[in-house]
Structures are given as structure tokens and as C-alpha cells.
Amino acid sequence: MTQLAVQTRTTPAGPVVELTGELDYDSCAQVRELLPGLALQDGQQLVVDLTGVTFCDSSGITALLAARNHALAAGAGIALAAVPAHLGRILRIVGLDQVFSTHPTAQAAEAAWTPPATRP
């Protein structure tokens, strides 16, 4: 069984999901099962912090796409933070670097978020 630790925290910008370990076929269900329970509102941003990801296969990529779909369905954005070099290479090869915004840290992703304008 592959080990993946998942922690979440809430910020004014939206939830941050921190992943540590291997994001693969055996572990991606943890991420997918977490998504419906995230409190994500219109205009917020879901940040997926990949600092501790040591391995990611196609199932892991699919879990990241599921997170994106969940965010978009809520009217929110998504950002990947601290993408390891090996995963960044995969994202570039398959063109997903054009789909996900990336930031060097979760804090940088949170700082880049701008709250939606107040509606009259």
C-alpha cells in the first residue's frame, strides 16, 4: 500500500490541501474522496500543495484534474504550489502546465489570490 498523507487547512482564499508521499493508483482515492467535503465557495481558490509529493503517476494526475473540476464546479479557481521538478516535467509534457497555475509555495498562491469584487 502506498503512503500518502493528506492535510487540509482553511485560509481566507479557500482550502489548502497538503500532500506528502506518493500520489498514485493506490493513494489517489484519498484525494478524490476528500474533494466533496471541502468548503469551497464561489470566487475562492483551492490550493494543492505538492511540496512533499515524491512520486506521481497518471492516477495522481487524474486526481489533480478531479480537484480542478471540483473547484471549477464551485465557481472557484485552483492553484498548484511547490510542484516538484519531476511532476512539473510531466505537467509540461502533457500540456497541463497550461491548465494549472503554479506558485513556488502555498503562501505565494494564497497571496496571488484576489477576492472577488463585492456585488451591489
Image (spheres, rainbow, N blue to C red):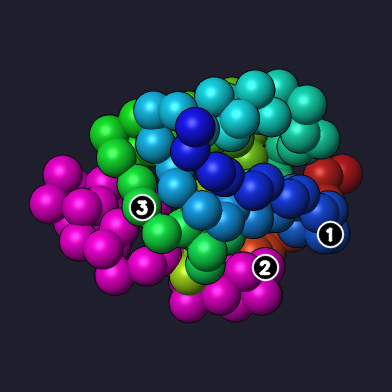
Which range is magenta? 83-110
Q: Quadrant of residue 74?
A: top right
Residue reaching furthest left? Answer: 93
Residue 47 visible? The answer is: no
The amino acid type, in three-letter code, at marker 1 is: Pro
Give me the C-alpha separation between circle 1 and circle 3.
30 Å
Instruction: Residue at 61%, 30% (x, y): give it.
Output: 30
List the residue tagged with mark 2. Answer: 110
Give me the C-alpha separation between circle 2 and circle 3.
24 Å
Q: Nearer the viewer, residue 87 or 102?
A: 87
The amino acid type, in three-letter code, at marker 3 is: Phe
List the residue tagged with mark 3. Answer: 55
Instruction: Residue at 49%, 32% (x, y): give it.
Output: 1
Q: Please state if 115 lies on the left or on the right of 61 as rendered.
A: right
Q: Please state if 66 lies on the left or on the right of 30 as rendered.
A: left
Kindly state the secondary structure of the residue where label 2 is placed.
Answer: helix
Considering the image in quadrants, where does the C terminus appear? top right
Q: Please state if 119 lies on the left or on the right of 57 as rendered.
A: right
User: Where is residue 109 shown, x and y percent of the image?
Assistant: 59, 68
List the residue tagged with mark 1. Answer: 12
Mark 1 or mark 2, which has the lower sequence index?
1
Mark 2: few/some/many CA within 10 Å (<14, 14-19, 20+): many
88 is within the stretch colored magenta: yes
Are the residues flagged by discs 2 and 3 in contact, CB closer than 8 Å?
no
Give me the C-alpha separation between circle 1 and circle 2.
8 Å
Q: Is residue 116 above or below residue 29?
A: below
